[in-house]
Image: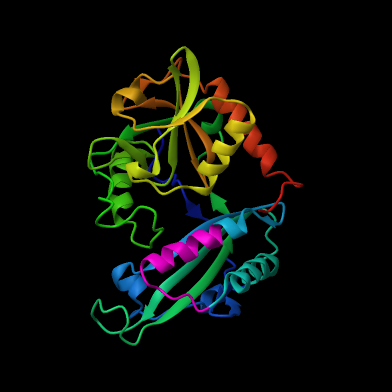
Amino acid sequence: MITTTQSLEQLSTDTDTVTRQIWLNGKLVPADQATVSVYDHGLLYGDGVFEGIRIYNGRVFKSQTHLKRLYESARSIRLEIPYTIDELDRATRETVEANSQENGYIRLCVTRGAGTLGIHPFNQCVPNVFLIVDKISVYPPELYKTGLDIITASTIRNHPNALSPRIKSMNYLNNVLAKIEAIDAGVLEAVMLNHEGFVAECTADNLFVVRNYLGTMTLITPPSSAGILEGVTRNEIIKLALQLNIPFREENLTKHDLYTADEIFLTGTAAEVIPVTKIDNRVIGDGKPGEITHELRTAFQNLVAENAPED
C-alpha cells in the first residue's frame, strides 16, 4: 500500500527559494518574487497551456518537440505566445544554467494573463510566460523494480469535442478527480476510460500493454482517437520498439485487455517508463515486470544518457 503523501509528480520543497531562479516574462527573478496577478485567467479559469520537460546530465531532453507541442496547444485555444520558439528555447537553457540543474524537471507555462472577472479571453489579457526549473520526485524507486498497483477510475476522460486531450492545458481538473479516486483506493495512479468505454490514458501517463496477438507478443497502446495526449515519452517508446523489432500496434483497448495482458507499463515525462503489476486487484501476468517492459525501459535509459541527442 502506498501512502497518499507520496505523490506522482511533486516538485521539490527546497527551503532556499531565494536562490532558485524563475524565468518570468523575459527576466530571471528569485522564486519568492516570481508572482502573477490573482486576476490571471490561468488561475481563475485554467486558461493556459504548459509543458513538462526533463533535464538529463544538463541537457534539455526533446526541447524542440515539447516547444512545438506547446505552440500547437496555444494555437488551438487562440492564445498568442509573445515569444518565438527559439526565444523560449534559449530562455529554457538560460534558466537551467541559472539553477545549476544537472538532472531535473522544467515546467513551462503560458497563461492567458490578467484580465477582467469574466471569461472573455481577449479583454485586457496580456499572456504571462514563466519557467520553473527544479528537482522532481516521481514514483518511489522500488516501484520501478516491483511494479505499480493501479485502479480504473469511474471518472472518464473529457469528451474530445468538449476539450481536446491533445491540448496540454492548465485545466487538469478531469485528471485530478481521477487521481483522487486513486488516492482514496490507496494507490498512485488510475486508468481513465473514454466516453465510449475504451482505455484512454492514466491521470498523468500514457499506457501500453503487451499481449499475445496471433501468436506473437505485441506491444499495444491506445490511438490518438481514443482521447489521449500523445506523450513525448510515449512516442519515443514507439520509436524504440520499432528499432528493437518489437511488434507494435495502436488499437482500442478495453478493461478486459488490461486484465488479461501479459505486461502493462506506463510512460510519461516525469514517470519515464514504469511497470504495472496489478490493476483493480487483478495480477498482471506473473505479477512481475515483464521482459519487453524491461527491454524498453533499458533502451529509454540509454537514450537519455549523456551522449543522447537533445532532439
Q: How many marks?
A: 0
In the rendered view, tell whether residue 198 sits above or below residue 7: above
Q: Is residue 7 magenta?
A: no
Report the residue at 33% width, 61% height from top.
171
Q: Is residue 179 above or below residue 26?
A: above
Task: Specify whether 6 is left or right of 144.
Answer: left
* The quadrant where residue 304 appears: top right
Q: Quadrant of the N terminus?
A: top left
Q: Residue at x 67, y 60 (%)?
A: 101
Q: At x 58% / y 31%, what residue is drawn?
A: 241
As for residue 80 lying within the magenta part, the answer is yes
| Residue occupying image coordinates x 35% and y 52% | 165
Q: Position of residue 188 (x, y in %)?
A: 40, 39
In the image, farthest residue toward the right = 307
- Most prominent secondary structure in the magenta stretch? helix
Residue 12 visible in rendering: no
> Residue 209 appears at what percent x and percent y?
44, 28
Front one among 261 and 95: 261
**Can you give x and y, in whole percent of width and height, for residue 61 in the image?**
63, 53
Residues rendered magenta in the picture: 66-82
